[in-house]
Amino acid sequence: MVASNTGSQLPNIVFGSDNLIFVVGAQKITPTLEEANKRLVDYVVPLEDERLMGIYKAHTTFSKALTYHKEVRTPLEKFT
């Protein structure tokens, strides 16, 4: 799951390279999607909001989330 306020990062993640490497701490990995959503809403957004208030005196919101279920690659030759 990738969360974003504006979504400006999401096209590069979704439509970019065939291979992506995400470097994350083990504390960010949750066993279920429901726990990931809860962590995002209860922990990540408030922490980011506090950080932005300190820097820009502005609040953040949770606007967009991207969830991968699986990735299927089909050769383009099949479509021509």
Image (spheres, grey):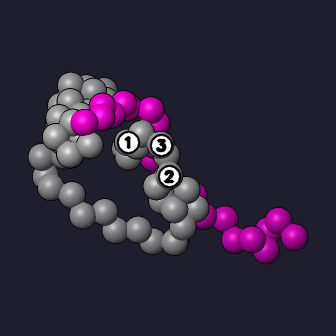
Name the residue that disc number 3 marks.
6
Q: Position of residue 9 (x, y in %)?
A: 46, 55
Residue 35 visible to an observer of this rendering:
no
Residue for point 41% across, 68% down: 20
Q: Residues within 10 Å of mark 3 (few under 14, many from 20)?
A: few
- For the magenta stretch, what is the residue range? 57-80
Question: Within the image, what quadrant is residue 53 found in?
Answer: top left
Q: Main secondary structure of the magenta part?
A: loop
Q: Nearer the viewer, residue 49 or 57?
A: 57
Residue for point 27% across, 27% down: 41
Residue for point 67% across, 65% down: 74
Q: Amino acid at mark 3?
A: Thr
Q: Are marks 3 and 2 in contact (CB under 8 Å)?
A: yes
Q: Position of residue 72 (x, y in %)?
A: 57, 58
**Mark whose residue sits in front, 2 or 1:** 2
Look at the image and tell me in which quarter the N terminus lies.
top left
Q: Which mark is residue 8?
A: 2
How far is the residue under mark 2 from the one under mark 1? 11 Å
Q: Which mark is residue 56?
A: none
Q: Are marks 2 and 1 in contact (CB under 8 Å)?
A: no
Q: Are marks 3 and 1 in contact (CB under 8 Å)?
A: no
In the image, is residue 69 part of the stretch drawn in magenta? yes
Identify the mark nearer the N-term, 2 or 1.
Answer: 1
Name the residue that disc number 1 marks.
3
How far is the residue under mark 3 from the one under mark 2? 5 Å
